[in-house]
Image (cartoon, helix red, strand yellow):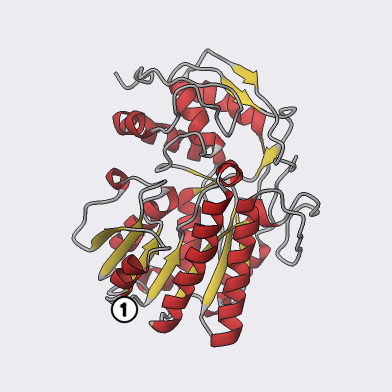
Amino acid sequence: MEDYKLHYKDKTVLVTGGAGAIGTNLVRALASLGARRVIVLDDLSAGYKWNLPSLANVLFVQGSVTDETALKRVFAPKPEMVFHLAAFFANQNSVDYPQRDLHVNGLGTLLVFQYCQMCGVQRVVYASSGCSIYGSAAPLPLKEDFTSLHLTTPYQITKMLGELYANFFHHHSGLPVVKTRFFNSYGPGEVPGQYRNVIPNFIFWALSGLPLPYTGSGEETRDFTYVMDIVDALLRAGYFDSAVGAEMNIASGREVNILQMAHLINDLTGNKAGIVQGEHRVWDTKKRLLASIDRARTLIGYEPSVVFEDGLANTIEWFRTNWDEIQRSADFPPGSSSAVSGVVVHADGRRPRGAE
């Protein structure tokens, strides 16, 4: 086993937001690598307890990163490592609820860093968002030394704020923090919903026999990153000393056309309902996204390994296997407009093709 994986054996690790899509996969990985205890702090506002592994070395604590009683409880066992994934997710949600976004992503992150400092945590890995903090004017591929103040949602602002707090704690008190900037994560573990990412929503609608709504011209691109590639990057970021104090893109380094992706999902699921054009989202000003991953390669040896088409197939299989739980948990309020599409979607409870 590689050194960075051996590093977690017999460690006590805290994962905030550990019941979310990335968090549940990270928790499973840490538990399988022999961590003495993996503590999960999650308020279940965007995560699901059924998605967490039921293992002897995994402890779940329901609570918010803004609740100091919960923070005292999860920091009491003196975790050596903290992965701060908890966030008020994501762009449209923050537009609708900007005060809650600031409370969770701003104050919550500040409190987590304060507790890490007070408890002498050996490494903190902060989950930032490369899709958010570069703004719309950055040249492609996106590189870490580009900064912009032209951000268009509260979520983008507070993700940048989290990085600024990380810089403060690193420079002022020597907190060993690493900033990882995720790009368009997808994969097993992400439940669809009004404020969720495009891929789980597309898969959910395709398996329900509904048309897939896209926004814009259909020529837009994104840098989709498979969740287990992200987990591997997080494990590396928690180990390599060269990463401390640095920010780095965690992406696939590949552009994927949104319209082609929609057609591919329909093909893989056997959905005959096709695609439809939805309303444009005012805040979505990025026509293309493509990240440079050179810095992550250099600092932590990161190399994404999952081909996009294979990742989609794995995700669809996870949907089929967990369809009943996903159907119960999918958050599309009756008559609501999807944050992804701007069109009204009604989930009717039909089972997906191949799940009968």
Left or right side of 314 for 137: right
Point out residue 9 in the picture as x, y percentages from the top left corner.
30, 72
Image point (39%, 57%), residue name:
26
Amino acid found under the numbered disc labelled 1: Lys
Instruction: Name the side, left or right, on which 133 lies relative to 343.
Output: right
At mark 1, the secondary structure is loop
Above or below, 207 relative to 141? above
Q: Which residue is at a point 50% across and 52% down the rendered structure image?
A: 88
The answer to whether residue 320 shows anywhere in this view is: yes
Give the quadrant of residue 323: top left
Q: Which quarter of the rendered picture does the N terminus lie within? A: bottom left
Q: Which residue is mark 1?
A: 78
Q: Nearer the viewer, residue 215 or 43?
A: 43
149 or 354: which is nearer to us?
149
Residue 146 falls in image quadrant: bottom right
Residue 175 percent across, percent down from the top left: 51, 81
**Which residue ends up furthest to the left in the rendered image?**
56
**Residue furthest front as drawn:** 99
Whether residue 296 is visible: no
**What is the residue that sits farthest to the top in this orientation?**
272
Identify which residue is drawn at 43% across, 63% down.
66
**Above or below: residue 172 compared with residue 14:** below
Q: Position of residue 321 (x, y in %)?
A: 31, 32
- Near-viewer residue (275 or 98): 98
Which corner quadrant holds the C terminus? top left
Spot occupied by residue 120 in the image (x, y as percentages of width and height)? 41, 84
| Residue at x-position 41% and y-position 70% | 82
